[in-house]
Amino acid sequence: MGTFESHSPSLLSRGEFGAEVGVPRLLGLLTRNRITTTFCIPTHTMQTFPAATHAIIEAGHEVAAHGVYHERVPALATDEERRLLELQIKLHHDLIGYRPVGYRSPAFDFSPRTLSLLEEFDFVWDSSLMGRDFTPYRPRPVIAIDRENGNTFGEPSPIVEIPVSWFLDDFPALETFPRGGALGSTETLFTRWKDHFDFAYRNGGGVMTIAVHPQTIGRAHAFVMLEHFVEYVQSHVEAYFTTLGEIAQSYHD
């Protein structure tokens, strides 16, 4: 769930659909299939839709940090990025009773400071970067960019990175203006996700991080596709759904 910096009643109503319709549908699907997963929720959304947030928690799902108001992190000044990260931690504790140990940046984007801030504030895992496809890893900061002689990496972070991809995100594929793509086909998206899963399954397994938004995947046509995908994954021996926190805990260098 998330909000963008807009006062458009039409755009805001899409967020309301996510909380009031999409979340109950998702929770029903997850419960029926005995799946526990991770919800990345901006604190603004927690405050605006407390019933949906508490339903997620009561169902046993993990809640990770996802910004205060789905802010554009690369556009933030250093002091503001720090302030908002501190505020997320405080509000998580105040609103749901515990601080987050995982983080997903709004729009999968970092500033040059984000990784070091996550380390400073003792986050265990992040799921925002794209340096692998099916393998968690420890991200290295780029400490110098040199177009003629190559970039220089710093040391690997203690944070476990659980990689993401726009190809495995429902929003750009299925949404429309503003903030989306061009109302793409659910058949195309299902095939893309299936191909990713089949590749990983044939080549030794791994972690496939699907990112779905209640306001998008909760629409009837997209929800039917998600049901089919869950059925497909669960038809495979040793394939299962879990939380990002569980993946981070099982990670070994």
Image (spheres, rainbow, N blue to C red):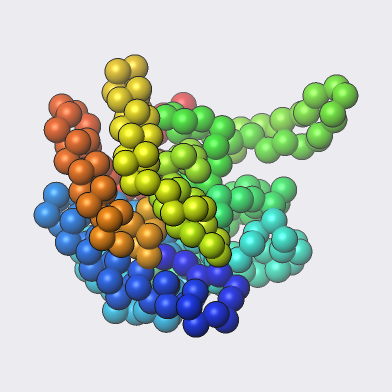
Q: Extreme top residue here?
A: 203
Q: Nearer the viewer, residue 226 or 188?
A: 188
Residue located 18% across and 56% down the image: 29
Residue 224, can we see it?
Answer: yes
- Whether 151 is drawn above or below 31: the answer is above
Which quadrant of the figure contains the N terminus?
bottom left
In which quarter of the view is residue 196 placed? top left
Q: Nearer the viewer, residue 238 or 184?
A: 184
Residue plotted at (30% across, 25% down):
198
Q: Position of residue 232 (x, y in %)?
A: 19, 36
Q: Is residue 114 left or right of residue 48?
A: right
Q: Residue at x 30, y 54 (%)?
A: 222
Instruction: Return the residue found at the far right.
Output: 148
Place residue 237 in its image quadrant.
Answer: top left
- x then y, percent, for residue 203: 34, 17
Visible residue check, residue 103: no
- Front residue of 217/241: it is 217
Q: Residue at x 14, y 49 (%)?
A: 33
Provide residue 86's location: percent of width, then percent of height.
59, 68
x and y percent of residue 226 in the render? 26, 48
